[in-house]
Amino acid sequence: MSVVRIWLHIVWSTKNREPFFETAVQRKLVFEHIRAYGHSKDINVDFVNGHIDHVHVLLALRATETVADVVKLLKGESSHWLKQQGIVPAYFAWQSDYFAVSVSESVVNRVRDYMKNQETHHLAKSFAEEYDDFVNRINKA
């Protein structure tokens, strides 16, 4: 029996980085729903958090899953659900792009801690700066 667990840190934003999730209550609903929906589809979503205009997801990919399929499923269903629940306006959409990077098993706890502190983190750094930092680190590797 093959055993596969590939940890991924995935980040995506709202279209045009609009701040649709300005309240803590909105953010909690969105993040909890993404996690619960992932679990209902047997996606191993470990942790979800974010800020007013983006989402961070930590998950463990299985052998039969692809990054593109999982992200498409989570983004598509959550967009539909958010509009259906009236949490966002009817014109809401996620940006088509996303960021995904593998995470070593040895640093999963550090990634969770980073994701937990999004509120504090974004007092000092915007999502645009955060995203550029992610991309620059990858391009330098």
Image: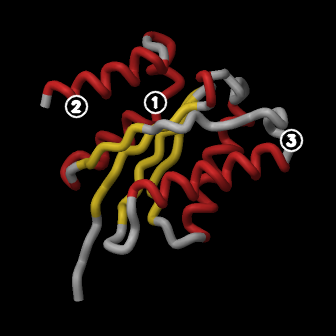
> Could you say whether the residue bearing mark 1 is in a helix, strand or loop?
loop
Of residues 119 and 16, the one nearer the viewer is: 16
The residue indicated by pointer 3 is 86
The residue indicated by pointer 1 is 117
Measure how far apart labels 1 and 3 are at the Cα level: 27 Å
How far across and how far down the image is residue 128, in percent?
Answer: 46, 17
Q: Quadrant of residue 53?
A: top right
Rendered-image quadrant of the N terminus: bottom left
Q: What numbered label is drawn on residue 138?
A: 2
Picture residue at 59% right of the left edge, 49% below the top: 75
Which residue type carries mark 1? Asn
Is 141 left or right of 94, judged from the image as shown? left
Q: Residue furthest front?
A: 96
How far across and how far down the image is residue 88, in percent?
Answer: 79, 35
Q: Quadrant of residue 7?
A: bottom left
Is 129 left or right of 91, judged from the image as shown? left
Q: Earlier in the sequence, mark 2 or mark 3?
A: 3
Q: Quadrant of residue 23?
A: top right
